[in-house]
Amino acid sequence: MLSKNQLGFFYMFISVCAFSLMDVIVKWSDDYPVGQVLFFRGFCGIIPILFLIPKDRFLDFYKTERPILHIKRCLAGLIAIVSIFVALRNLPLATVVSISFASPIFTTIFSIFLLNEKVGFYRWLAVFVGFIGIIIISEPGFSSLNIYYIYPIIFCLGLSYVAIAIRKLSSTEPVWLISFFFSFSILIFSFFSLYQQWIMPSLIDLILLSSVGILGGIANLWLSQSYKFSEVSLVSPLKYLALVFAIVFGYFIWDEIPTIKTSIGALLVIISSFIIFRRELTMKKQLSVARHD
């Protein structure tokens, strides 16, 4: 029988694996319009959520007292997911994953203005280190005017606001409702891309495209389960396995080899996000001790 921490490790590991596989499929699906892939992400992403709705809420599960915040969260999420899909199709997998680790940097900045949080020296230092890492990773794009390097940064901005919004929503809203509204918004948004002439997929492609939504939906649930069973400080470092998977998949499928600049920049971004994470954990412990006193 596994302990709670072991269960937390297990759920985080399979969550990272699921997200990594989803990224690979999105990158592979460049023959299909982005909107069509979004349709499968939204439609199939709803399926696992339906099993979580309590029986007594099945008829009115969609009701919420915070519709405006849900809309803001969904809009930010749509900006993020479209940006990461475009980036995955046009940049090396390891490059996209490396820059995506910078989202805690923007979350720290947003928390100052949206949550009135005070940011001390260590977190400002982490923000500075992280930005240096982003510049190092993106330098080839800046020098060649490759606009696609902007998309992972836009993803980080969108995801950062999503983190803030979910932090507010989770105080009153169940996780499954937050996830449902987001998947449903992706589904609706995808229909605006019908003009792109969607392609009829083969049976194998249909299965792969459908797995984008299922993997994305289940991975989010596994991530939540990981935090439920284990301390965040123990399991969060496993997220960085995504970079290892990205390097392996990128090399064997697309012959992509990360440059030295990408590797150095990724290391700085990871160090930055780790500093932010550890600092937030310390602050929470201090608040907890103060409350008990």
Image: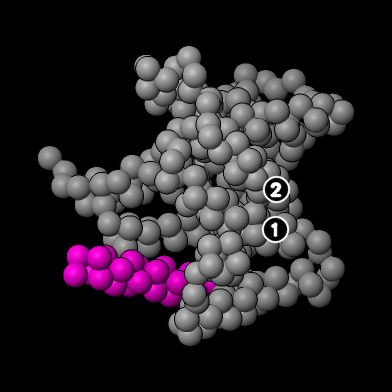
The residue at the far left in this view is 1
How many marks the image carries: the answer is 2
Residue density around tag 2, few if under 14, some if 14–19, many if 20 or more, within 10 Å:
some
Amino acid on which the number 1 mark rests in the picture: Ile
* Dominant secondary structure, magenta: helix
What element does badge 2 sit on?
helix
The location of residue 64, given as percent across then percent down, is 53, 31
Mark 2 or mark 1: which comes first in sequence? 2
What element does badge 1 sit on?
helix
- Residue at label 2? 79
Q: Closest to the observer: 84 or 128?
A: 128
Amino acid on which the number 2 mark rests in the picture: Ile
Q: Is residue 260 rendered magenta in the image?
A: no
Residue density around tag 1, few if under 14, some if 14–19, many if 20 or more, within 10 Å:
many
Quadrant in which the C terminus is drawn: bottom left
The location of residue 61, given as percent across then percent down, is 48, 23
Report the residue at 35% width, 71% height from top: 283
Q: Closest to the observer: 229 or 60?
A: 60
Left/right placement of residue 104 relative to residue 229 reads right
- Residue at label 1? 154
Left/right placement of residue 222 relative to residue 8 reads right
Where is residue 139, by image quadrant?
Answer: bottom right
Where is residue 290, by image quadrant?
Answer: bottom left
Left/right placement of residue 28 relative to residue 90 reads left
Report the residue at 81% width, 61% height from top: 147
Q: In this rendering, is residue 264 above or below 156?
A: below
CA gap between label 2 and label 1 equals 8 Å
Residues in magenta? 264-293
Q: Is residue 267 rendered magenta in the image?
A: yes
